[in-house]
Amino acid sequence: MTQGELHSQYDLGLLALAALNVGVIVLDQDERVRLWNSWIEAHSGVTADAARGRPLLELFPQLAGGYFHETVRAALHQGHPAVLSQSLHDAPLPLFTIPLSAAASLLQHVHVIPLAGPSGRHCLIQVNDASAAHKRESMLKRKARLLQESLELQRTLTEELERSHINLEALVQARTAELEELAGHLQDLSEREKADLARELHDELGALLTAIRIDISWLQRTISEWPATAGTKLQRIQDNLDQGIQLKRRIMEGMRPTLLSNFGLVVTLQELVRERAALNQWELALDLPPEDLTLGEDLSITLFRITQEALTNASKYAQASRVMVRLAVDEANIVLTVEDDGIGMPAGTVQPPYRHGIIGMRHRVLARKGQFAIEPVAPHGTRVTVLIPRAG
Ligand SMILES: Nc1ncnc2c1ncn2[C@@H]1O[C@H](COP(=O)(O)OP(=O)(O)O)[C@@H](O)[C@H]1O
Ligand SMILES: [Mg+2]
């Protein structure tokens, strides 16, 4: 390299140093300033001419004994480089933002780099403006905090939701149990009222009708003393009375089958099923326990009503040709099955919600802590199965 070339290299170096958007200070072994670029001039308010040759601590006395001074000494005497990042040391040097008139302390990122020069050890101090990085960092911190907060909020909400879900489920369960109990109670009540009414019909109305019957008999015996037309009238009264008595018996049977009270469940079921089979021309398969089976009255009426409803459904909807009714009893349980070979339930009715007939059967069973099922049978038809614990 020629002398001229060397000079132009040197000039270019100086130009570059002046144009750098980074602060550059070079100190010699005695901590005297050897280089002070324009960026440092602008941010310190100290010109290069004023700084050159003077010890750093004279320019910045506030650095004496501080961490930054330690770092510089370590670089000069032990050759240790160091980085002072803005997140730990926000402003190691007393530098300011521009314009200096409204200056605030400048956030810095500082490298302290030992230089092994021909005339002994030097130290290069490189200063970067860290305010952009700082802004970015604080923005990130804010975002992280917001994220954290929203995560916490989400967690709280999820917990809250889970809690209310559990509460809701418990509430629904409690309400369902209450409603089931109420339905069972109402069914029992209705059965009891029907039984009372049936008894009253039998006792009061029955006595009345019998009294009328006796009087009519008397009239018939003494009819010869009456005009001829009276005979026809009397016959009509007699016919109407017989119809009334039959009506009373039918109503009573509907409310409380006298068979059930007098002969028990098995005989009553036998009668019921045979009567319905004859009416609907069903082929019948009947499988019942011995007639002397004794069950509580409430349990008997429950099983009777369920059989009644299942047979009513079979005759109304099934178009069956064969019906099977089975009552199986062991120590613990009673199992009632009513099965037809009809067309089966229309799609959609096999699953809840059912209509009132099926709901009524289910409630009667659940009220006795039993199990109820209505399901299709192969190849076609419907089966109602009821299991009720005997000690219910
Ligand atoms: N044995 C059966 N065969 C065919 N369909 C049935 C049978 N039992 C019940 N169903 C169907 O289920 C529906 C609901 O029955 P149910 O709850 O007793 O109400 P309802 O008799 O008042 O219609 C009936 O309308 C009918 O369509
Ligand atoms: Mg029905």
Image: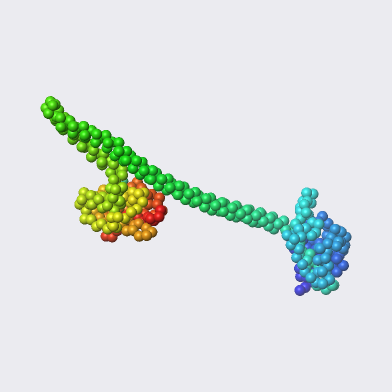
Q: Residue furthest top?
A: 227
Q: Which residue is located at x 31 percent, y 57 percent?
A: 327
Near-viewer residue (219 or 49): 219
Near-viewer residue (290 or 178): 290
Q: Quadrant of residue 250?
A: top left
Q: Which residue is located at x 36 percent, y 49 percent?
A: 298
Near-viewer residue (113 or 302): 302
- Labels in figure, total: 0
Position of residue 183 measured from the top left corner of the image (x, y, whole percent): 40, 46
Position of residue 349 measured from the top left corner of the image (x, y, whole percent): 33, 51
Q: Which residue is located at x 30 percent, y 51 percent?
A: 264
Near-viewer residue (285 or 351): 285
Q: Is residue 134 left or right of residue 264?
A: right
Colouring convention used in this rendered image of the protein? rainbow
For residue 37, above or below residue 246: below
Position of residue 207 measured from the top left corner of the image (x, y, whole percent): 27, 36
For residue 247, above or below residue 264: above
For residue 1, above or below residue 242: below
The answer to whether residue 278 shows anywhere in this view is yes
Q: Which residue is located at x 79 percent, y 64 percent?
A: 125
The answer to whether residue 21 shows anywhere in this view is no
Q: Quadrant of residue 386?
A: bottom left
The quadrant of the picture occupied by the N terminus is bottom right
Q: Is residue 31 left or right of residue 363?
A: right
Position of residue 228 measured from the top left corner of the image (x, y, whole percent): 11, 27
